[in-house]
Each structure stands twice: as C-alpha cells, then as structure tokens.
Image (cartoon, helix red, strand yellow):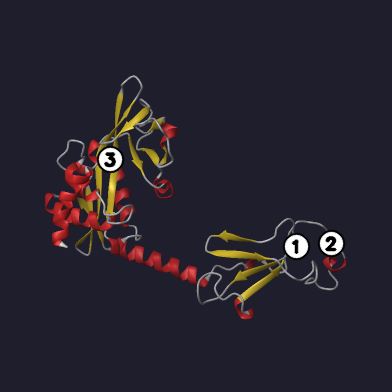
C-alpha cells in the first residue's frame, strides 16, 4: 500500500499531487484495507493499492526486506512532520478568518426600531428567497409577528455594517406544556436574516451571542429552537429531548434543541413545545404580501 500526502501549492487539496515534486510518499503495510479516502481537518490521505510487492520499498537491510512481521502497520518511512496541511486550505481559512474579523470590527448590534421594519423585511426576503423552497415566507412571519403578543420586541435586534442594515434576529415566545396542562414559557429566536453578501462572516453568530444574555436578564429560563444542530451546538444548545421537550405532535428530532439560560431553567414541566401560530403561513396571504416586493424589485 502507498500513502500519498498532497502538499502542492496550487489547486485544491489533493490537486496536483501526482507530480513528484508535489507529493510526499510514505510506504505503509496495511492489513484488510483496499482503497479509501481519509479526511482529517484540511488535508486528506489517499490510500491507493500499490503494484509494488509488500516490503519492496524497504531498505535491503531492513526486517521488511527479509520477512513480513504481520503487524497492521509495520513501518512509516517519514516523520509525522511530513503530514502537512494543504496550502490552499490554509489560505482559504485565513482569508475567511480575516473577513470575519474585519466584519466584526465594523459591526454594530442594537435593538430594532420601527424605522427598521421595512428594510428588515426586504433583508429577510433577500436572505431566504429560493434557499429552502421556491420563494420564501420568512419576511411575512417577521411582518406579522411584530404586532402579536407572541413577539418579544426587547430581544429583536438588527446588525449594522458600515452604517447599513446587515442582519436581523426575531424573538418570540414559546410554551412547554406538560401532560397535566402546566405551562412554562421559553424564548425562541428565528428567523435570523443576514445580507447575502455578508453571510458566513459571523454576523448571525454575533447577534445570537449578543441577545442570549439579554434573554437571561429578562428572566427567561431557557431558549427552544429548531435548526441545524451542527451550527447551534456551538452556542451550547443540546437535544431538547434531554430536557423532556418534544414537538407539538409528540415527536422528537435532533433539529429541536434547547438551551438553559440559568441552571435548572428548563427543569420545570416537560412536555410538548408550542410555537406561535404565526409561523404557519397561508399561501394566499403570502402571495398577496409578496407582490409589493416584486413591484419594488
């Protein structure tokens, strides 16, 4: 077996590693392994079947040249320092980190005001349009939620970048209802909207981290959301089922997550979570509301 570690400066990881000067080759003896690709952070090791007989690459005076020891990994003919990260991946990560730092340096997060309403709806539509479905309904949800008692205006915030609207986070109330009918209030955020040109630069994360302490100071014991676990776990969210919280229909799923803002904040009645009915959108109402955006566009 031969292990090829791409170390080229041009192209993607594993790009031009076939050229002699762009690769580091290690001779490995591996048992019960034919072919595969191993991912490890920003570089990969490509294991390919070698046409060279076992031990042929070993020095003539080595044990491998005389006999096969039968161990899963007999010998590595390069130090661990040979494992190098792809130069392109390092540059890409540095570039992303640099963009995020520059964005954060110019970012201002403040409470949403009525003067922001129209621009926030345009931003929300631009952020979600044709992303998860044809069109979107998030801008209508934001529009209707503001006039509902379910909304938590003190937690609804906008992000400004160089003086222009860059992001928005909406908060509303959720209720956890036990089998006996006892209810516990929790906070819920979403949708979170970020200007497409500034997405993946930490704007959404900054709004979440800014508003969660505010929710705690307002007396909310916890937050319940639905979303991508891989993203929201970084903020401390965990599977809601661990708190005894399930969907309104009684089902449980990894996308339903919860976070205690204070110790024991979600240790009250466990049961089914109820979100605002405004998250259910009527198609005809959406079509009528969306017409004004089409005219403006």
User: Do callouts 3 and 1 mark residues in contact (Cβ within 8 Å)?
Assistant: no
Q: Quadrant of the N terminus?
A: bottom right
Residue receiving disc 2: 68
User: Do callouts 1 and 2 mark residues in contact (Cβ within 8 Å)?
Assistant: yes
Q: Position of residue 105 (x, y in %)?
A: 29, 63
Tag 3, which secondary structure?
helix
Quadrant of res 245: top left
Residue 159 in sight in this render: no
Q: Position of residue 247 (x, y in %)?
A: 37, 34
Query: Which residue is most to the left?
Result: 115
Decide which of 51, 15 is in the foreground and name it: 51
Q: Residues within 10 Å of mark 3 (few under 14, many from 20)?
A: many
Residue 253 in sight in this render: yes
Q: What is the number of callouts on the image? A: 3
The mark closer to the camera, 3 or 1, is 1
Residue receiving disc 1: 29
Q: Position of residue 214 (x, y in %)?
A: 27, 42
Tag 2, which secondary structure?
loop
Tag 1, which secondary structure?
loop
Above or below, 64 relative to 149: below
Q: Residues within 10 Å of mark 2 (few under 14, many from 20)?
A: few
Residue receiving disc 3: 215
CA distance for labels 1 and 2: 9 Å
The mark closer to the camera, 3 or 2, is 2
User: Do callouts 3 and 2 mark residues in contact (Cβ within 8 Å)?
Assistant: no
């Amino acid at each position: 077996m031969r292990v090829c570690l791409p170390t080229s400066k041009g192209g993607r990881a594993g790009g031009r590693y076939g050229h002699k000067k762009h690769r580091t080759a290690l001779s490995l003896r591996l048992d019960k392994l034919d072919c595969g690709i191993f991912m490890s952070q920003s570089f990969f090791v490509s294991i390919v079947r070698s046409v060279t007989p076992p031990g042929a690459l070993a020095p003539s005076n080595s044990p491998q040249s005389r006999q096969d020891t039968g161990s899963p990994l007999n010998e590595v003919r390069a130090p661990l320092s040979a494992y190098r990260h792809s130069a392109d991946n390092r540059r890409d990560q540095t570039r992303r980190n640099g963009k995020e730092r520059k964005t954060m340096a110019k970012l201002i997060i403040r409470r949403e005001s009525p003067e922001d309403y129209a621009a926030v709806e345009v931003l929300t539509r631009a952020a979600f349009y044709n992303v998860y479905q044809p069109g979107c309904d998030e801008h209508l949800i934001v529009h209707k939620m503001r006039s509902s008692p379910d909304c938590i205006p003190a937690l609804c915030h906008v992000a400004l970048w160089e003086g222009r609207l860059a992001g928005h986070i909406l908060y509303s109330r959720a209720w956890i209802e036990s089998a006996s009918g006892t209810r516990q209030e929790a906070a819920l955020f979403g949708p979170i909207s970020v200007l497409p040109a500034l997405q993946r630069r930490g704007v959404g994360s900054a709004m979440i981290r800014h508003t969660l302490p505010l929710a705690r100071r307002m007396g909310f014991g916890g937050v319940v959301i639905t979303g991508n676990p891989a993203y929201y776990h970084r903020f401390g969210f965990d599977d809601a089922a661990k708190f005894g919280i399930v969907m309104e229909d009684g089902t449980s799923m990894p996308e339903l997550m919860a976070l205690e803002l204070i110790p024991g904040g979600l240790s009250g009645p466990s049961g089914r979570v109820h979100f605002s009915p405004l998250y259910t959108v009527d198609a005809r109402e959406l079509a009528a509301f969306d017409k004004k955006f089409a005219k403006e566009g």
